Image: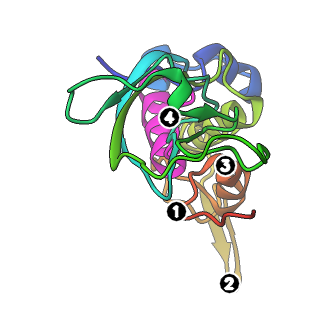
Amino acid sequence: MADPVLATVEQLEARLGHAVDADRAEALLEDASAIVRGYTGQYFTKVEDDVATLAVNRGQVTLPQRPAEKPSLISRADGSGTYPSGSWYWGGIGVIDFGSPSWLANGPTRSWTPQAVTVTYTHGFEEIPADVVAVVCQMVGRVIDGTDTPGLRSESIDDYQYQMGGNIVSGAVALVPSEKETLDRYRRRSGSVRLR
């Protein structure tokens, strides 16, 4: 089964201002959604009780999908048991801390941390963010309007040349730099800096 699209045919038609072939549009929306998910590393759609096995780095686990809710279960990666909720701290920003929270001055200190854990958590948006919907629709709109519009595609007279559709290959679903900039805020960080 294909992943849910990040924009609907109705949202696409509203932006284009005309009706489109629903089957073709749905296929293109699937392609654009996959490209956006691949670029950002985010699923966006709400997922209940997703399970991920993650490495613990310096006593912390960063959940890969955002926004994330407090984990419902944290287990040993080898399946030999679970960690009680008192052995980890949820700060609400997608990070599980196995040490004392930095703001807890006189709290208990722990010298142990697991190497890896299996986390069960809910993540994603109830409603896909408007900027993500806009980017997906723009990507598909370029393909539909670039190939479905009858008539003039390009013309040239001596040194003058006019071309419709910009510099993207007609028929290709792709992200342009301005769309990447819009999506950058959703991308996973490849590293982090700890400030304490």
The residues tagged by marks 2 and 3 sit, at their Cα atoms, a distance apart of: 41 Å
Q: Quadrant of residue 139?
A: top right
Front one among 162 and 54: 54
Question: Who's the residue at 69% across and 44% down the image?
Answer: 101
Q: Name the residue under label 3.
A: 183
Residue type highlighted by circle 2:
Asp
Rendered view: 5 above or below 106:
above
In the rendered structure, the answer to whether residue 164 lies left or right of residue 111 reads: right
Residue type beneath disc 3: Leu
Q: Is mark 1 on a helix, strand or loop?
A: loop
What's the residue at 76%, 44% (across, down)?
A: 106
Disc on the earlier residue, 2 or 3: 2
Is the Cβ of the residue at disc 4 closer than 8 Å to that at disc 2? Answer: no
Mark found first going from the N terminus, 1 or 4: 4
- Mark found first going from the N terminus, 4 or 2: 4
Residue pointed to by mark 1: 190
Image position, residue 182 (x, y; %): 73, 51
